[in-house]
Structures are given as C-alpha cells and as structure tokens.
C-alpha cells in the first residue's frame, strides 16, 4: 500500500507547473498577467487615438514641428540657395515622463483557499481598470490644454494655426451641453475649423459624456444622424451614432466635464448642467479633477487645475493633437518565493510610466458651454 501511495504522489498532475517542473503556481501568475492587460485594454480608449511613442534611456522625448513654406519665382541667373525668408520654420515640443503609476493589492493565501471565486482574476481586472482610467484622464486633459494653445511655430509671417474652442449652445446655462441640436452644430463647426486649419481627415474622433452621447441617439428621428431603417436597433443598443461630419464618436467618464470627470450632478447653472443625482452612484462617479503638477507629487507635465475646466464639456481631435510617451508599458509584477512564505500571500502590482501633452494644437478642439467667454489657456 505504501508503494502504491508513493506512485500516486509522483504521478500527480500539477496544472500550474510549466512542463511539470518548477513552481507549481507559475502558469497561474501568467494567467493573472493576461487578465490585467485585458482590463487595461478594454477600458483605455485614448491610447490608440493619439501619437504614442516608447521612451528609452531618457526622461523626456522631443517632437519637432516644421511650419509651412512658400513657393517663389526664380530670377534668371540667381543661385538657388533656399527661400529668401529662411522658411520653413522649426520648433520643438518636449514631453516628460511622469513618475511610476501603480495599482496593487495583497492577496492572502488563505483567502484564496476559502474563496469560491477566482480572486486573483477579479483583482487583476480592477487593477487594469485603475491604470486605464488614469491613463485616459491625463491624455484628455492634455488635449484640452492643446485646444487652448497657440502653435509653437511663431516665425513672423509663418505663424501656424493653433487650437480651437467651440461653444455648445448660446445661453448662460451649462445644460446646453446636453442639447442634441447644439452638439450636432458644434460637430460641424469643429469639422469646418479642422479643415480650414489643414488638419487631416484621417483619425478624427470625439469623446463625449455618456449622457451627451445618449441625447444624440434619442434625437435621431429629427437630426438625420442615423438612417431610418436602422433607428430601432440603434436606440436599443445605445451605440447607434457612428460619426458626425466624419468624426467618430466615443463616450467616456474620463473627459474633463465642468471640473469633474465625465459627469456632474446638482442644480443647474453656468457651470453645472443640472442633472439630478440618480442616487447610490458610489465614490468613483463624479470625481473632481486633481490639481496640476505643482500640487500633485509624481506629475511632471502640465495637466491644468480643476477650476480651469469649469465649462469644458467634450473633446474633438485628430490623432496628431496629443502625444503620449511610455517608459514602462502596462506590466504586472507578483511576489513569490521567500516573500510569499513570510507573508503567506502575494503582492500583486500593476504598473506603468507615461507622460502626455498636446503636440499639434490645430488638431485639438474643446467644446464648452454656459459662458460666452472661451476658457483661458493654461
């Protein structure tokens, strides 16, 4: 009998081992890594909508601007040594990497044993969500800053176009931001402005508050945004509007929206659209924007102060509008070995190091409401 038990033990299949050798939980940790990336990728929309570059062996990345030049008629006999005005002008923009961004949790081994669900998988998704949320918020704030900025090219006679700010509606009420007709008009104004400033049609997108997006869908019977043959399915799916004026539309709770992230409840005013809190929304909804680099440790780029977004209500941009540098892409790290033995559990860490800023202001459009005065640059 003893010999039989010994045989059973040595032939035991350990599904967490790699090729039946080594750490019995090695493959489980790789599964967790995949879950974290899935949570990040499914929730980070800004990463693929702007210029993303990998930063290596340095703290910042330089982007070069080249302005326009002009054609001149040649005078017979004159040497051709470049335009007489020295065009095209050149300028630079530098994006610095912010400090390491992390989200972590300690998983007690006994909790895993007693739990009836996959604890690590659930935690991994939430870590991915947290990193994606911060990632999007910083990029959207950078785009807003770009919409208020002039071009870095300032050579006399060769000044390039800067950012665009478009008012949604014409009253002193922030609720104009939810009016479908106002939004449609703003989209066409933005498209015209981008055309006039020489911005490519390729890669134009908009990001709106979810209630703005749904306001557009509810009004499809009159604004002609969706073919009447598909109105039923569009209304039911909540994803009926593909684009307006060639601008693809996304909805997000991470855009600057009247000094909050994504939504704002309360009494209507010039800085509040007047939406009633539906109740039980939790502490992660309607969060106020963090302040800028001077007030937040770890931020090395300018993302603006909370008060500077008091009337912001949407973004329209082309992918050249902002840049994102990544020194460390989304990664997961998990303790093991002696550390796990000492603490009888593992620390699960998701991390990334990135920084964002606007690049081409001409490709950035900020929507604002509740005031006739354009929000000031910062």
Image (tube, grey):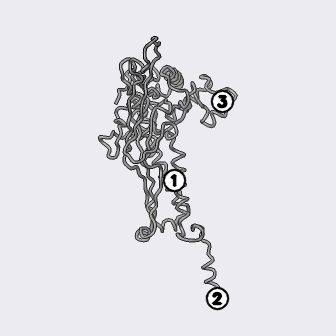
Q: Residue at x 35, y 35 (%)?
A: 304
Q: Position of residue 35 (x, y in %)?
A: 54, 54
Asked if one can make out residue 327 in the rendered structure from this viewpoint, the answer is yes
- The relative height of residue 166 versus residue 61 in the rendered view (above or below) is above
Neighbours of disc 1 within 10 Å: few (<14), some (14-19), many (20+): many
Q: Residue at x 40, y 42 (%)?
A: 355
Quarter of the rendering occupied by the N terminus: bottom right
Distance from disc 1 to disc 3, alpha carbons, whole Å, reads 36 Å
State the mark number for residue 227. Answer: none
Quarter of the rendering occupied by the C terminus: top left
The residue singled out by tag 2 in the image is 1
| Among numbered discs 1 and 3, the one appearing first in the sequence | 1
| Among numbered discs 2 and 3, the one appearing first in the sequence | 2
Distance from disc 2 to disc 1, alpha carbons, whole Å, reads 46 Å
Neighbours of disc 2 within 10 Å: few (<14), some (14-19), many (20+): few
- The relative height of residue 120 versus residue 272 in the rendered view (above or below) is below
Front residue of 280 and 223:
223
The residue singled out by tag 3 in the image is 231
Front position among marks 1 and 3: 1
In contact (CB < 8 Å): disc 2 and disc 3: no
Q: Secondary structure at mark 1?
A: helix
In contact (CB < 8 Å): disc 2 and disc 1: no
Front residue of 242 and 183:
242
Q: Position of residue 89 (x, y in %)?
A: 39, 25
Q: Secondary structure at mark 3?
A: helix
| Among numbered discs 2 and 1, the one appearing first in the sequence | 2
The residue singled out by tag 1 in the image is 36
Q: Residue at x 34, y 36 (%)?
A: 305
Distance from disc 2 to disc 3, alpha carbons, whole Å, reads 73 Å
Extreme residue toward the top, this view: 76
Q: Secondary structure at mark 2?
A: loop
Q: Position of residue 24 (x, y in %)?
A: 54, 70
């Amino acid at each position: 009998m003893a010999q039989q038990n010994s045989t059973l033990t040595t032939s035991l299949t350990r599904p967490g081992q790699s090729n039946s050798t080594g750490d019995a939980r090695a493959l489980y940790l790789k599964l967790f890594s995949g879950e974290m990336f899935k949570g990040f990728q499914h929730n980070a929309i800004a990463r693929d909508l702007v210029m993303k570059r990998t930063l290596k062996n340095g703290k910042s990345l330089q982007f070069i601007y080249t302005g326009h030049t002009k054609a001149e008629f040649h005078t017979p006999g004159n040497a051709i040594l470049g335009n007489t005005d020295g065009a095209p002008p050149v300028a630079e923009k530098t994006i610095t990497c912010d400090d390491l961004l992390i989200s972590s949790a300690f998983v007690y081994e006994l909790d895993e044993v007693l739990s009836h669900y996959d604890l690590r998988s659930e935690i991994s998704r939430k870590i991915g969500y947290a990193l994606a949320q911060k990632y999007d918020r910083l990029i959207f704030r950078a785009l807003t800053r770009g919409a208020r900025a002039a071009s870095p090219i300032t050579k006399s006679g060769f000044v390039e176009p800067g950012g665009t700010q478009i008012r949604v509606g014409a009253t002193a009420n922030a609720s104009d931001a939810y009016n479908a007709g106002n939004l449609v008009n703003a989209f066409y104004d933005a498209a015209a402005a981008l055309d006039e400033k020489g911005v490519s049609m390729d890669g134009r997108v908009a990001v709106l508050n979810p209630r703005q997006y749904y306001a557009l869908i509810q009004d499809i019977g009159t604004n002609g945004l969706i073919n009447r043959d598909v109105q039923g399915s569009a209304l039911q799916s909540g994803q009926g509007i593909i684009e307006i004026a060639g601008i693809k539309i996304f909805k997000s709770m991470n855009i600057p929206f009247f000094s909050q992230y994504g939504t704002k409840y309360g009494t209507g005013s010039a800085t509040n659209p007047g939406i009633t809190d539906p109740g039980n929304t939790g502490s992660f909804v309607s969060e106020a924007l963090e302040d800028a680099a001077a007030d937040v440790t770890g931020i090395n780029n300018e993302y603006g102060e909370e008060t500077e977004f008091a009337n912001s209500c949407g973004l329209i941009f082309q992918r050249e509008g902002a840049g994102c540098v990544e020194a460390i892409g989304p990664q997961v790290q998990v303790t093991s070995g002696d550390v796990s033995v000492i603490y009888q559990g593992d620390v699960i860490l998701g991390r990334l190091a990135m920084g964002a800023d606007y690049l081409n202001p001409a490709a950035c459009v900020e929507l604002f409401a509740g005031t006739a005065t354009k929000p000031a640059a910062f």
